[in-house]
Amino acid sequence: MTRIALFAVVLIFLLLPPAVAQTPISAPFQLELQKDYVSWTWKGILEREFATAGQGRLSLSNNFQSNLYLQSSPRDIWRDQNTFQLRWERPLSSRLSTATWVYSRFFADDNTGREFIQNDAAQALTIRVHPKIKLTPSLGWSMENAFDNRDQGWYTRNSLNISRLDMGGYVNSTTLSSQVRAFPGRTNQEHTAFTGWSKTFSQYAGDSVRVGYQFSESNNVLGAANLAGETLLEGVQINTGFVFNQLNYRFSDRSVMAVITDFKQRKLEQSTPASGTESSLSGDREVRIRQELSLSNQFQHLWIARRWQIQSGVMLSQTDNNNDPGIETDITTLQTAFNLNVAYQPGAASRYWSQLSYTKLEYNAPASSVPAIRNLQGDRDELRFIIDSGFRRRLSEYLSYSLSANVYLFHQVFIRTGRSQNNNWNRIYQLKSEIEHRLSERVSHRPVLKLLANYTVFDFDEQFPQARSFVFRKFIAGDSLEIGLSRRLSFNAQYQGELEDNGTFFKASFTQQVVKELTSHYLNLAFKYAAWKGLLLNAGVVWYKRDEWAFNPQEERIQVRAFTSLTPRLALTMQPGSRLMLFARYAPSRFENRSRSVSEADFRSTLQYYTSGSLTLRYLF
């Protein structure tokens, strides 16, 4: 019944008669159906707006989504949600205007057994005390239904907005808002204060400051009422504040500096009925508090010349997370970061670049009074170096090439003796070359080669009976081909082949014992046909094959897995005009997986068929 109502709301307002409003304004209507291997998804969006008599405006918005999860059991799982809003605004004078709105939200999940309904209706009056200052008080009625617990009470939402008001050279934007839902025995509320100031002192200097604070309190129904008839509630209070400052200074037309300071604090307090009791907000409660505090400072500099561009920066930050009760999860994080980006362009056909970043993270937890626990705490330092360099050159309008190299170095050091056995280095090296070649006006291709090596080395590997260090290496070769067969028909092919191996790494001799080898091939063939009246047809097939080999105790190479998939694809896009668009996609898939262990002679084979697709209709009124 609920899903029928969701669709009915969309269709009724889609066919809203002209008598309700005089002049429709363009707005979208969209329906979408998607299917993958284990679920169906329905989505709908309707946004419509009308200009009414007396310079009024009527707007309607509805969004729904329904998911069906196919289960192996006879009972399938549904998850539905819908949001609806109808709003009518009308000016009374140059300083006064009114707004009436109805808001509804619905959520249901068969998996958790939860169902939530919220309905609001309110009347607002907007007073424009200044061209850039407006005050909006509103009063209404709110109803909620959760776990068959029905509540209703007063709803208020008040706001003050200042939009870029010039106060003696300082430009100010301020928002004060308050929203309260007062139900019998509980209150949900949210209060926000924000102000921002900016000033341009001269053509070389400017400053901006933003300050904000928010308090929210929500008391949510946890389940059905207890034996005493009391509603079980979860209380959540959140206090959040921030201060942000950015100073910009221009030394010259080529040199700019920015200094940024960012401070944030957040306190979250959660209360639930005490364990073993069935109490409401007035009874015994278990309270958990989490406090977060962060402060960061950044210095950024940009220098631009005719052919050079150099950007550098430094960031220092500290973050504290404290949880009460207990200190097991308390942690302080210190971060130091430096980055340098250099780009050089000697001409229109060439470009060189190099990027360097360094980051140091320190994680410090309060020391436990128990030595056995203290030695296992996760205090650690982490160092990261990232270097990315390369160049790109265009030899002609038909040929260009690029070469790039990337290095990632990571070092993790645990401070406590009980965890220092996990100290490790991680090194990742990558080399990539790419060519763009246009053979003619209608034929082009792009071959790509990649080399990747990933080493993880533990510092104290020699003290363990079995090496834990490992290495992963991969070679990738690919090409994409595009052929324009005619003015309306084109062909596209993509291929990528991969060779990889991974195994144990012995750092003393810098040798590897391969434990697994893999190969994979990916091929995508597609035709694209642009027919008449906005009709676009895509048809093709995707083929993928992956093979794996392992080694038995005699170090014999044995294939242990062979996976193959084949997916024909068909997509249709139709856009006969600027208002209507229809998209349909269909893709049946066939998967075959053959696997065995190194000690087995025969493969175990699994054959599966899946179908995925989507259908989207979009109409602009």
Image (cartoon, rainbow, N blue to C red):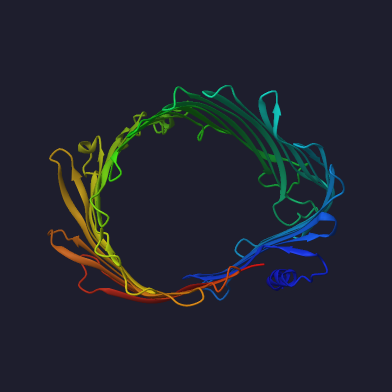
Quadrant for the N terminus in the image: bottom right
Q: Is residue 474 above or below residue 208?
A: below
Q: Going by the picture, which residue comes out furthest to the right?
A: 92
Quadrant for the C terminus in the image: bottom right
The percent coordinates of residue 381 (x first, y second) are: 37, 30
Count of picture labels: 0
Q: Is residue 118 left or right of residue 66?
A: right
The answer to which quarter of the image holds residue 81 is bottom right
**Observer-nearest residue: 255 or 316?**
255
Q: Give the residue drawn at x 53%, y 23%.
A: 205
The percent coordinates of residue 309 (x first, y second) are: 36, 33
Q: Is residue 524 above or below residue 184?
A: below
Q: Is residue 536 left or right of residue 394?
A: right
**Observer-nearest residue: 522 or 445?**
445
Q: Is residue 82 above or below residue 177?
A: below
In this rendering, does residue 514 appear at all? yes
Q: Is residue 606 left or right of residue 395?
A: right
The percent coordinates of residue 516 (x first, y second) are: 22, 57
Q: Give the residue drawn at x 83%, y 46%.
A: 138
In this rendering, does residue 357 appear at all? no
The percent coordinates of residue 455 (x first, y second) are: 24, 44
**Observer-nearest residue: 177 or 458?**
177
